[in-house]
Image (cartoon, rainbow, N blue to C red):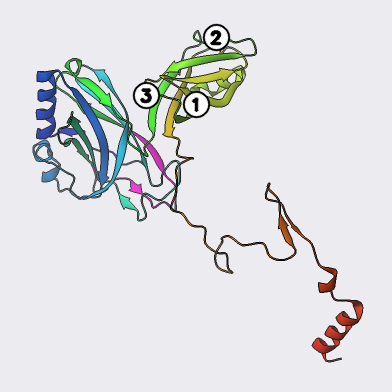
Amino acid sequence: MPQPFKKAVVTDAGIALMAAAQMVNAKVEFTKVVIGNGVYSAEEKTDEYLQAQTSLKSQKNTFGISDASIISEHLIKVTALLTNADPVTNAPIITEGYYINEIGVYAKIGDQAEVLYSIAVTDSDSGDFMPSNDYPSQIIQDFYISVENAENVKIKVVMSPGQPYIKPITISKDAWEDDGTGFHVDVSVPIASEDLFPIASIASDSKDTAQTAGLWNDVESIDGAVRFWADQQPKSDINAIVVLYEDRSKEGTDYVLPIADEDTLGGVMLGTGIEGTEDGTISAHANPEDIADDAEVSAMIKEIFGL
């Protein structure tokens, strides 16, 4: 059962940052989310104590900001993906599990140093357990942060290297275009580009609509939008979550394939009588001279069993 957190507290540094942004009409850039396993006493969970903090007690991991938006005059929502393994390469991020007892959000203006803008701690003695990468876990976490006046704040989100961008979307039933063989729609996602790899997850309340319309599994990231296809025009709006990843399939790697042995899965070289084709098919061709004849087989049997 998820463990509740106390409401996020904007730090003194965060208050000063927002005041400076409003004064010079600058963009506030939310840069990262950090989580840790620091333990706080009842006295340390007060707003007064948390407001004075400049870092977590025991920071364990850092995650990029996926999205940020203004919810109301005094509220901003920040979204991040908390995971124990890289969502693209599956490389381990967390190798030893721990309890998430504290969460912080960092922000900055321009080239200035980033500051701990907001901090939240668990309401109970310990928070949710984040397992090691042996047990894959991904959490799309929303953080609601209070501000003095959101209308005077411009929010900028930068996609961090290696971190996905996550955005809830609604595909309007009236936005679909007939292209002759089916229908397509471009949903505005400003950060989208041809260099990003998209994945879409349809909300449970929209799955019947998507299935009836024949919504394709294929999704395309284009400049400023994400494109969907369907066999028919949907009868209702479709709610979904779009996740954009950097395409790192062409990047180099330092990985070296180990040599296979009885204990290690790895690479082997083809020896005499073994051939491999371009599609990976392996064939064995025995040399007749290497095959024992009936007399030799009979002699070996007598030798083995002492006949």
Instruction: Identify the residue under disc 1.
Output: 204
Task: Say which of marks 2 and 1 sits in front.
Answer: 2
Nearest the camera: 237 or 229? 229
Instruction: Identify the residue under disc 2.
Output: 177
What's the magenta region? 123-141
31 lies above or below 60:
above
Q: For residue 147: magenta?
A: no
Nearest the camera: 304 or 280? 280
One can see residue 209 in this view: no
Amino acid at circle 1: Ser
Q: Residue at x 84, y 73 (%)?
A: 289
Q: Are marks 1 and 3 in contact (CB under 8 Å)?
A: no
In terms of sequence position, does the residue under pointer 3 or pointer 2 come before the other? 2
Mark 2–mark 1 Cα distance, whole angstroms, equals 24 Å
> From the viewer's perspective, is 110 left or right of 223?
left
In terms of sequence position, does the residue under pointer 2 or pointer 1 come before the other? 2
Residue 156: where, in percent of width, then height? 26, 24
